[in-house]
Image (cartoon, rainbow, N blue to C red):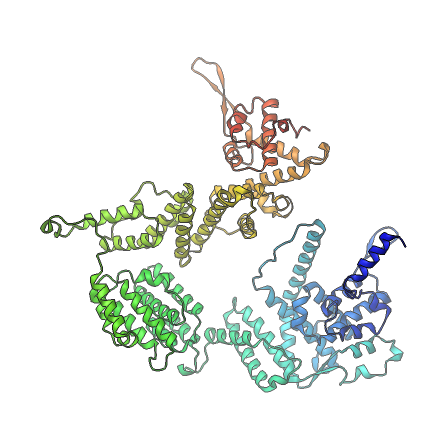
Amino acid sequence: MSAEAADREAATSSRPCTPPQTCWFEFLLEESLLEKHLRKACPDPAPVELIVQFLEQASKPSVNEQNQVQPPPDNKRNRILKLLALKVAAHLKWDLDILEKSLSVPVLNMLLNELLCISKVPAGTRHVDMDLAALPPTTAMAILLYNRWAIRTIVQSSFPVKQAKPGPPQLNVMNQMQQEKELTENILKVLKEQAADSILVLEAALKLNKDLYVHTMRTLDLLAMEPGMVNGETDSSTAGLKIKTEEMQCQVCYDLGAVYFQQGSTNSAVYENAREKFFRTKELIAEIGSLSLHCTIDEKRLAGYCQACDVLVPSSDNNSQQLTPYSQVHICLRSGNYQEVVQIFIEDNLTFTLPAQFRQSVLRELFQKAQQGNEALDEVCFKVCVCNTVHDILEGRTVSVQFNQLFLRPNKEKIDFLLEVCSRSVNVEKASDSLKGNMAAFLKNVCLGLEDLQYVFMISSHELFITLLKDEERKLLVDQMRKRAPRVNLCIKPVTSFYDIPASASVNIGQLEHQLILSVDPWRIRQILIELHGMTSDRQFWTVSNKWEVPSVYSGVILGIKDNLTRDLVYILMAKGLHCSNVKDFPHAKQLFAACLELVTEFSPKLRQVMLNEMLLLDIHTHEAGMGQSGERPPSDLISRVRGYLEMRLPDIPLRQVVAEECVAFMLNWRENEYLTLQVPAFLLQSNPYVKLGQLLAATCKELPGPKESRRTAKDLWEVVVQICSVSNQHKRGNDGRVSLIKQRESTLGIMYRSELLSFIKKLREPLVLTIILSLFVKLHNVREDIVNDITAEHISIWPSSIPKKQLWLILEP
């Protein structure tokens, strides 16, 4: 052995020994290996991975002598592989929760169809036409497993799923993923067509009064034997793993309840069926107890379903004591009994039954109704908001924006209601010190935010305030309020008698309008507008400054808001945010956009999407002006948001051209060429000219290292740019009778106007992309002098110095 070989041997032997993974074909060679493998504490590969491997190998197509692809042959090897997959599933006790979590829809569909086949279910026979009571127990159980999985898959497909972040794109992987997606969609289509039959099969199963049996590894082995070797054991009514009637019915009831609940979105009468099944599931769980080995129900999810059914289908018993708080709130909202909702919320501040998210959703619904012109709900909104704020304070959360907005102009009635809610929400004798401390700090902060001392004394003299704060704290607070200077002190008063004369309303409005123009603090802007609208009701304050400009595609939606205050606030916040973004004051722009987003989210999904788009554009500008200057790549979240914008297909959303322009330029500048060439959806190429141009540029960047004759995309790019830059000639007869030639600079022959192309180029800074563009312009100038005269001269000044002049020859020469 040479010295080098000895060194390699020594290095290899010194490494920790990792046991090799068992390969799928080893289980074919040794019959007893599967059971040994599954008995391990942490088998590698895991059971579900084995199922995938076995079925994958068994379903591989073959190729005949004429090189034609044939279906997988039905030979002994493939039959054994399918049997091994079934045995692994039997080892997992046919637990659909485990199987669904780890196996794709096509794989699980294949597995369960193999179970039906080996359980002697006749192929092509509708399950609904079979009498479950007359079938062998294992056959009936196989049919139930398949139909339970069918409706569970239908329900699961109706839930929104967060897409996994794709890794580095590989063409073969993408093709495989696309094939699996299409196969899944086809299976779902069949399952949905058969959904009614599956529901009838499961309903029939609830009428069975006998225990069922499911195949085990032993019964599957017996079924696989030659017919003459079977001793009749598999035909016995007690072969396999016993599933008690109650366990089977519990699982079936839960699955039926879920599918009925899903169907209720289109047929509300079906919610009654869902309620019946879910409450029967609860009864069966109580009967079975915790000893069940084969019945696993997500009891938290079941409780959520039951609460939802209580709200959607209240019990026929009208005794409100038996209704859950959810049902009581829902009934009150439907009947318009809003004062009762307020009382329920106050009582819940002691019990904390209703989650904060539910309470906020109720407030949001009331705000939307008030925005639609129901002014009677303004008081209800304030009261519900106070209840929610006190609830948040007691749980240690901060005061909401809505409360600060609604409490900017307090009056005696508002203060009285706030004190009533605080008093009824705290049991002073039983409450913890932290809870009492939260309430005391809240009341203290409310006092500090009040201008009128009369209201301060209302709170400081209240029994709850006196109980929660010590005498020293109360006295210090009151003295602090008395000595507090006025909020606005414009100048020292040299002549007391003159300056004591109160200013007129017009002077006050003028001062506030001046502050409104200068302020970039969204909460101060909100406060000023509330004060201005309190002084006059016939003014449109979004017209105060002629420098407040909002794109016309947005202004129509904003000016259509019915509430004057909300309309002014949205318009001014957006106008100021856009101005700050244009002057590169990105921190203030982000504050203004965030406040506007929070405001419009309450009542307008359309404006909410508009603000999300503008915040995306702002984040692009912020990165390009900051970390992007040093060459640091943008965060993956920003790239994902840019992709999401480009792929967005929401109808009726007003869109600014500059956002799409910036997004495509951003992808090119950061070399996201794989996405633009391979992953961009096809519909975008037809609907978005910037995406089409970006795809051609990205594909050309990828083609450049290859030979010129293979640069098909470069030729396509040349044709697109020629069409964009072409000038349409028109003839006109002059006063002297001669025909003159007029060149129209903007042509509609191409996918965009030339001015739009030039604007887009100014946003590009990736050297290779710029070299390609400049080369095209040089070629245009040399070859087609009638097309361009000033493009190169106009844009040579923006070219980065990093591009060598030697690269400016026609690299795209055909």
Q: Quadrant of the N terminus?
A: bottom right
Please state if 347 lies on the left or on the right of 91 as rendered: left
- State the image coordinates of residue 629 (x, y, percent, origin top left): 52, 41
Comparing 623 with 733, the one in front is: 623
Please state if 309 lies on the left or on the right of 203 as rendered: left
Comparing 675 with 726, the one in front is: 675
Q: Residue furthest left?
A: 497
Comparing 463 with 595, the one in front is: 463
Q: Splitting the image into 4 quarters, where does residue 388 fall?
A: bottom left
Comparing 698 with 560, the one in front is: 698
Q: Residue at x 39, y 43 (%)?
A: 579
Q: Residue at x 21, y 56 (%)?
A: 486
Q: Is residue 179 above or below residue 431?
A: above
- State the image coordinates of residue 158 (x, y, percent, origin top left): 58, 64
Q: Splitting the image into 4 quarters, where does residue 517 fall?
A: top left
Q: Splitting the image into 4 quarters, where does residue 195 fall?
A: bottom right
Q: Is residue 772 above or below residue 355?
A: above
Residue 121 seen from this side: no
Q: Quadrant of the C terminus?
A: top right
Q: Is residue 721 above or below residue 743?
A: below
Residue 235 seen from this side: yes
- State the image coordinates of residue 444 (x, y, percent, origin top left): 29, 68
Please state if 34 lies on the left or on the right of 610 as rendered: right
